[in-house]
Image (cartoon, grey):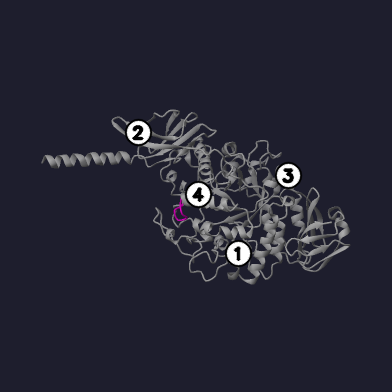
Amino acid sequence: MIKKLSLLIAVCVMSLGAAFAQTIDKIEPLFWWAGMKNPELQLMVYGENIANYRPSISYEGVVMKSCVTLESPNYMLLYLDISKAQPGTFDIVFQDGKKKFTYPYELKQRKDSTDDIQGYDSSDVLYLVMPDRFANGDPSNDQIEMGAEYQVDRSKFMARHGGDLKGIEDHLDYLVDLGVTAIWLNPVLENDARGGSYHGYFSTNMYQVDRRLGGNEDYCRLIQKAHDKGLRVVMDIIFNHIGGNHPWVLDPPAKDWINESPSRRGNHQKSVFYDNYASKYDSDVMKYSGFQVDINQANPHISKYLIQNTIWWIEYARIDAIRQDTYPYADYDMMRQWNLDVMAEYPQFNIVGEVWTEHAIGTSWWQKDSPLNKNNTYLKSVMDFALMGMASDVFNDKSENGSLGRIYDHLGYDFVYADIKNLLRFLENHDTSRFLRTAPENLDAFKQGTAFLLTITGTPQVYYGYELLMNGSTSSPGGDGNVRLDVPGGWPGDTQNWFTAEGRSEMQNEAWNYMSALLHWRQNNKVISDGEMKHFVPQNGVYVYERYLGDKNVMVFINGANKEVTINLDRYAESIKGQSYGVDVVTKRNVQMGKELKMAPKEVLVLDMKK
């Protein structure tokens, strides 16, 4: 009997101990670093009824400034001053009367240098990849048990297809050979959502890479290997909204944690920020995106959490830059502070915001130091959606003289940008129709669009598969799935392999080689990355512009007409500058600068000018 009673007591004690040990589900950030410029650290504690406990810390250099409980008893926020703390692990003691348990928390040693975090600039070309659709390097992580049900089925647009970080890692040499210098991955954080949320834009854990893509260590390894090959890495993040299965949605910490729209939907009218006539109602509705669950960044606790999360990923994974999704929808003041705090820790870093507007003036308003905006955003880089919106129509125009005048007019507004080099320019991305709406009959539009994108001012971005002539429209059945296709050869058992010249068609190889030649020529070419630009009003369908720096210059001739055109070169004398010929950077042939230049229909020439 005594033995049975002792056993029962032991089991009860073990059960109580286990219950206490399980009180803390997690603390975020997962760890932190001593030596940060900002000495304040917020710890968000998750645990059932954790608000009933009182925390304490006894570790030299760590001072608990405050403990905040919220409306839900399952959260607690600790604000620490770690300005004098040394690296090490300390215990956070949680006590409720006689109940007491500890949670170990680690302060790591911050690296002495941030030289390996490079940012990006106008000398780079960003290559955008949707990880689930690029390549499947590790089929063992395709079907992992998650909280929500999902499918892995390559025949369905909305299902997961199995692409992962290992697949990207396995094809880094492909990207180096192509000639791009940076890779931007669509979001890689956990999306534990019904259906699988293959695109990554419905985060459910901001400190965990989705295990179906690999995991945190795989992400860090990919970045290190990319750096070793001279490639920079851009992380895609979302502050505006989270997935429906995020803990903050399942158990909201407080009523003001989630935004609601006065109209129960967003209006996507970004102009309300600078429109002198905008109503308060429309401005309030704009702040609600309607994409998923819209979180309230104006809440100071959320603001601190998000800023720390960014700094954590930079310091931990050594990413070089960030692309911020749906930038204008998040709280304006919070985003200003985010930019300031990140740049204070990493001055060489770069952040590009997705500001989807239809005019250069509206886009420029969002860029750091814009003379149009008295309340500086401090956002270093913005995206030229207006160019994307017209590029396919212009370069695919089959009318007699084409419509290159639209491009000329658009570039005429470049004067509104505070930093034209930090304007991200692109022809397509994961949210838009492909530049090639259908399979091309020839490469006229592709070559003109590619040459234009890679030689104008700003920083170019290309979308995976563009070099392989991927095509499709979001207006077709399947929607976004039409522009988020798998790359053949990226999956075991594929009968085609577009990652190799042997697996591509003759036209694909011609396109790939053309683009690769321009990309490699562009690398370290300061005339293109840093030079000035001069352009001429299109005549007879021909658009001509010059890039120049010091005594070097490049001239680009684009014939938008569907007929042969002979142009008088006297008009371009101020850019030709008496030089006798130019070398076509792709074909290497010499093009004489005499009195006239004859151009074939839809021809494009990129000429290194020579005396």
Tell me if residue 232 comes above or below residue 377 in the rendering: below
Residue 190 visible? The answer is no
Residue 48, position as x, y percentages in the image: 35, 40
Q: Which residue is mark 1?
A: 472
Q: Earlier in the sequence, mark 2 or mark 4?
A: 2
| Mark 2, secondary structure of its residue | helix
| Horizontal side of residue 447 vs 83, given as left or right | right
Of the residues shown, which amino acid type is indicated by label 2?
Asn
Query: Which quarter of the rendered picture does the N terminus lie within?
Result: top left
Frontmost residue, 273 versus 304: 304
Separation of residues labelled 3 and 4 (CA atoms) = 38 Å
Of the residues shown, which amino acid type is indicated by label 4?
Cys
Say which mark, if any, is on residue 52.
2
Query: Which quarter of the rendered picture does the C terminus lie within?
Result: bottom right
Q: Are marks 2 and 3 in contact (CB under 8 Å)?
A: no
Q: How many C-alpha atoms fall within 10 Å of the one at disc 3: few (<14), some, or many (≥20)?
A: some
| Mark 4, secondary structure of its residue | helix
